[in-house]
Amino acid sequence: MELRHLRYFQTVARELNVTRAAALLHIAQPPLSRQIRQFEDELGVPLFERVGRGLRLTEAGRFLLEQSLQVTQRLDEMIEGTRRIGRNEKRWFGIGFVPSVLYGVLPDLIRELRADQSEVEVGLTEMISVQQLEALKSGRIDLGFGRLALSDPAIVQQVVMAEPLVAALPARASPGEGDGGDGGGRGRVGGDGRGGGDGEGPMAPAELARRGLILYPARPRPSYADHVLSLFRAQGLQPRVVQEANELQTALGLVAAGLGITLVPASVQRLHRDDVRYCPIDAPGFVSPVIMSYRAGDASPFLGRAVAWVRRQAEAPG
C-alpha cells in the first residue's frame, strides 16, 4: 500500500464520482479507476459499490475513510512541522512520558515550554521508561519522564520526586470486606495531593497482598509493574496477580468492575472517578519515583531551560 492509494481513495470517497475525483487529482479517469481497483484487490475487500451513475461506500470503505483521514491528517501535520523546523522557524523538542505523570509535573512543564510558540515545537509521545532510553539515544525525544531507574552511561537520570502510592479499590465494598480498613468511603485528594479516604485508615501491605492485584503495564517489561512487585517482595509478601492490563485507565476500569485492586501514584486521584476509591498504604517505602531522563552531554539551551524548571519545581516547598 502506498500513500497515493489512500489519497486517491479519499478523494473518490468524498466525491463518490470517479470523473470528478480525477479532475481534482489532475489525472485521467481510467488510470484512477485502475488504481482504485488495484487498491481493493490489495485489501481483498470492495470499498465502493455502484449506485446508478454514482458510487456508494461499502461498510469497509466507510471504516477505511474514517481511519485513513486520521492518518493523513497526522501525516500532514508532521510534514508541515518538518518544514517549519527545516526553515529554522521552530526547533523540535520531543518529550516521552509514562501516563501517570500527566497528573503531576508534566502539564505545568508543557505549558511553560509552549509559552513561546515561535521558539519551539513540543512533541509528546507516550512510552514506558525502557522505551524512553532508546528514544533518547536515537534522538527521537530530548527529555523523558518515567518511573523506573535504569543504568546507562549515555543517559542522565534524576529523581524529581518520590510520590506516595495509594491503593485503588472499587467504590462499593465487595462482600466480605469491612474489617480490613477499606470499607465504605470514597477517596479524595487532600491539600498535599496524597489523598485519603473519607474515614478510611491506611491499609497494610499484608492486607493488600491478600487481595487480587491488577498489574500494569503488562508489557513491555521491565516497567512500573516490576517496581510494584518489588515493593511487596521487600516486605516478604507475594501478591496474587489476577489480571494484567496495558494501560492505567484499563486497570482502574477493572478495579471498578470488582476484579481486584491496583496501586497507583497518589496524583492519579485527581481523576475523581466515582466508581473507584483510594486508600493510603501504611508502609513508608511504598512510593514511586518520578524520574527525569536526558542525553548526557546534551548542551541544548532549551533542554537546559526545561531541566532547570523541573528542578526548581522539585525543590520548591510543599
Image (cartoon, helix red, strand yellow):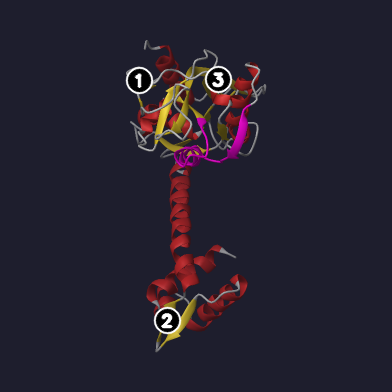
Residue 302 at x, y percent in the picture:
45, 26
Disc number lying in front (3 or 2): 3
Q: Picture quarter containing residue 66?
A: bottom left
The Cα atoms of the two marked residues, 2 and 1, are separated by 64 Å
What is the three-letter code of the residue carrying label 1? Gly
Q: Is residue 246 magenta?
A: yes
Picture disc at residue 199: 1
In the structure shown, which secondary structural element does the residue marked by tag 1 occupy? loop
Note whether 160 is above or below 21 in the view shown. above
Please state if 104 lies on the left or on the right of 126 as rendered: left
| Residue 97 in view, yes or no | no
**Sequence order check: which comes first, mark 1 or mark 3?**
1
Based on the displayed image, in which of its 4 quarters is residue 237 positioned?
Answer: top right
Q: Is residue 219 left or right of residue 33?
A: right
Q: Amino acid at mark 3?
A: Pro
Which amino acid, mark 2? Leu
Which residue is farthest front? 176
Label 2: how many Cα within 10 Å (few below 14, some 14–19, many 20+): some
Q: Which residue is mark 3?
A: 205
Q: Is residue 197 left or right of residue 155?
A: left
What residue range appears in magenta? 239-262
**Residue 107 magenta-drawn?**
no
Q: Disc 2 designates what residue?
A: 55
Could you say where residue 22 lies in the image, as x and y percent from the top left? 44, 77
Image point 43% across, 56% down: which residue?
A: 73
Residue 109 visible in image: yes
In the rendered structure, which disc, 2 or 1, sits on the residue that comes first in sequence? Answer: 2
In the rendering, at what x and y percent does residue 281 appear?
A: 48, 19
